[in-house]
Amino acid sequence: MRNDINLRRDVLDELEWEPGVDAAHIGVTACDGVITLTGAVKSYCEKLAAERVVKRVRGVSAIANDIDVRLPGIAERTDSDIARAAVEALKWGTPVPEGRVKVSVSKGWITLEGEVDWQYHKDAAFEAVHRLRGVKGVTTLIVVKPLASATEVTSRIEAAFRRSAELDAHKVRVETRDGKVTLRGDLRSWSERQEAERTARAAPGVTNVENLIVVTP
């Protein structure tokens, strides 16, 4: 495990390097490879961007993102305005079948509910709404209906891992039950861990992915 002082410095440097993040308003602590982010940013998109930046840093094993979203006055919108914008974004900006996802908004926080056939539909719904002006957060309660057997799902994911140049397929174990995929193993970086999860989520029939892979630099 890298020295926490050096790890914190690397995270701060990476945040400073990222043009989409105002690092001056973000606090960073490191403890045994776990990074905690605090402070405040001007949008939910910036909060997620800060988290993505930290995941790039070698030595990070986990992240607690406690950053607050404090919208500037000009970005404030009513819940009704946000809800209408979210419905339009889902209708015209995604492959999600119309009427399959319902939207509710409370104090700037969007909740997505419904049932879809593919994980990428669920991911696309999130991508469509989380960047909207005035959004302070998104909860995705969308359910993916399983379309394939557990054996078929596992085989497809393992084959995709073997094709990938970005991760060591031999170090990841795949378990599938009722559409839920569990990943276990030991990889070298957070980005490699995320690539394994992204690949698993793209498989047909996957309803959820539990990523238990351990990062050991």
Image (tube, rainbow, N blue to C red):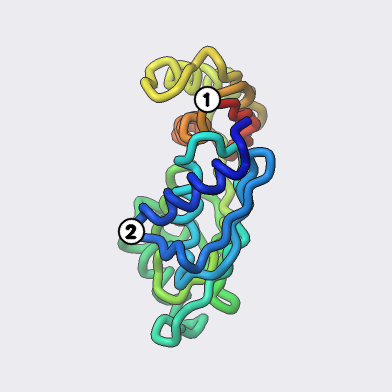
Q: Position of residue 18 (x, y in %)?
A: 36, 54
Residue 38 is labelled as none
Q: Identify which residue is drawn at 36% across, 69% down.
A: 88
For label 2, the crowd category at 10 Å Cα-Cα, with few meaning under 14, some 14 to 19 and many 20 or more, is: few
In the rendered image, the vertical position of residue 109 relative to residue 121, given as above or below: below
Q: Which tag, 2 or 1, sits closer to the chain's start?
A: 2
Answer whether residue 67 is visible to the viewer in this image: yes
Q: Amino acid at mark 2?
A: Pro
Q: Position of residue 55 (x, y in %)?
A: 50, 43
| Residue 32 vs residue 62, the one in the foreground | 32
Choose top left, top right, bottom left or bottom right for residue 162. Answer: top left
Residue 188 is labelled as 1
In the rendered image, the vertical position of residue 206 relative to residue 184, given as above or below: below
For label 1, the crowd category at 10 Å Cα-Cα, with few meaning under 14, some 14 to 19 and many 20 or more, is: some
Choose top left, top right, bottom left or bottom right for residue 46. Answer: bottom left
Q: Identify which residue is drawn at 40% across, 74% down.
A: 133
| Residue 67 vs residue 199, the one in the foreground | 67
In the rendered image, the vertical position of residue 184 relative to residue 143, given as above or below: above
Quadrant of the rendering where the C terminus is positioned: top right
Q: Identify which residue is drawn at 60% across, 22% down.
A: 186
Residue 142 left/right relative to 21: right
Quadrant of the rendering where the N terminus is positioned: top right
Q: Amino acid at mark 1?
A: Arg
Q: Which residue is mark 2?
A: 19
